Amino acid sequence: MSKAADLNAILDLCDEEKIQQWIELHPDIIPDGKFVCDRWVLSKVPIGTKKITDLAFLHETSGPWWFYMVELARPVVQIFNKADEFTSGFHHEVQQVRDWIGDFRNHAQSLSSDTSVKFGERFAQGLRLCSSIGMLFVGRRSELNNELRKKRWADFCESMYPHIEVRTYDHLVDVVARYEVINLFSLPQTQIGSL
């Protein structure tokens, strides 16, 4: 079975823990081509005292650096209700990511201190200087099954950018399929780390 088919089958099970475990075995798919500082994707990063991301990574560019905080929404969360409006569960997931972005500003310094020993001073310095972006994976593409939903989804995603990148889980399946075609899984892999 291909890795894309494997991920799709796990997504169909709607088991959040199994999805997280699969993605942690293949962390390169989350950044999707973004340069990851020192090849570290972090799991379960505390942001402040009560909030914890599913994953996070530091994206290094020639300009500003960006700390991506990733939420893997519960697989049972629907994007739309029968009236083609966004569900309260969807809004809850978006608000969680918004809260992380706000809290990151207040806690970047302590997070930098926590990471310097484990991931190196360069990584920690990048955290001190970066801005944050949220990334939310939620629902399946099959929910975008009429023109109104497609328009609302596109408008919503555009309105969130660049602060939050919102994607369906099918985006990850597409990334895995693309990586398999060009054999990126054979290259040195990004590492998973935790604080």
Image (cartoon, rainbow, N blue to C red):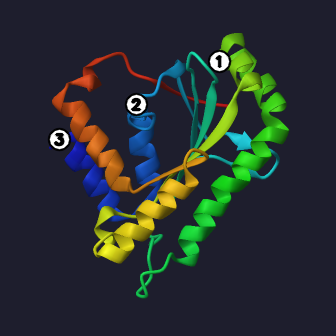
The kind of residue on which mark 3 rests is Ser
Q: Which amino acid does label 1 sit on?
A: Phe
Left/right placement of residue 79 relative to residue 183 reads right
Residue that badge 3 annotates: 2
Amino acid type of the residue that numbered disc 2 sits on in the rendered structure: Asp
Q: Which residue is drawn at 36% across and 16% down?
A: 188
Residue 15 vs 52, above or below: the answer is below
Contact between labelled residues 3 and 2, with CB atoms less than 8 Å apart: no
SS category of the residue bearing label 2: helix
Q: How far apart are marks 3 and 1 (CA)?
A: 32 Å
Q: Which of 30 and 145 is in front in this view?
A: 145
Cα distance in 3D space between marks 2 and 1? 17 Å
The disc, 3 or 1, on the residue closer to the chain's N-terminal end is 3
Q: Measured along the vertical axis of the image, is residue 89 above or below residue 169?
A: below
Q: Quadrant where the C terminus lies? A: top right
Q: What residue is disc 2 on? A: 28
Using residue 71 as the reference point, say whether residue 25 is left or right of it. left
Q: Where is residue 15 in the image (x, y as percent from the top left)?
A: 42, 61
Q: How far is mark 2 from mark 3, CA to CA?
A: 16 Å
**What residue appears at the point 47 percent right and 63 percent down from the top-left corner?**
155
The dot on residue 107 is none
Q: Which residue is painted at 44% across and 23% down in the image? A: 190
Can residue 115 be seen by looking at this rendering?
yes
Tell me where residue 57 appears, x and y as whole percent. Answer: 57, 31
| Residue at image mark 1 | 119
For the residue pair 3 and 29, the one nearer the viewer reads as 29
Q: Which residue is drawn at 44% across and 82% down?
A: 81
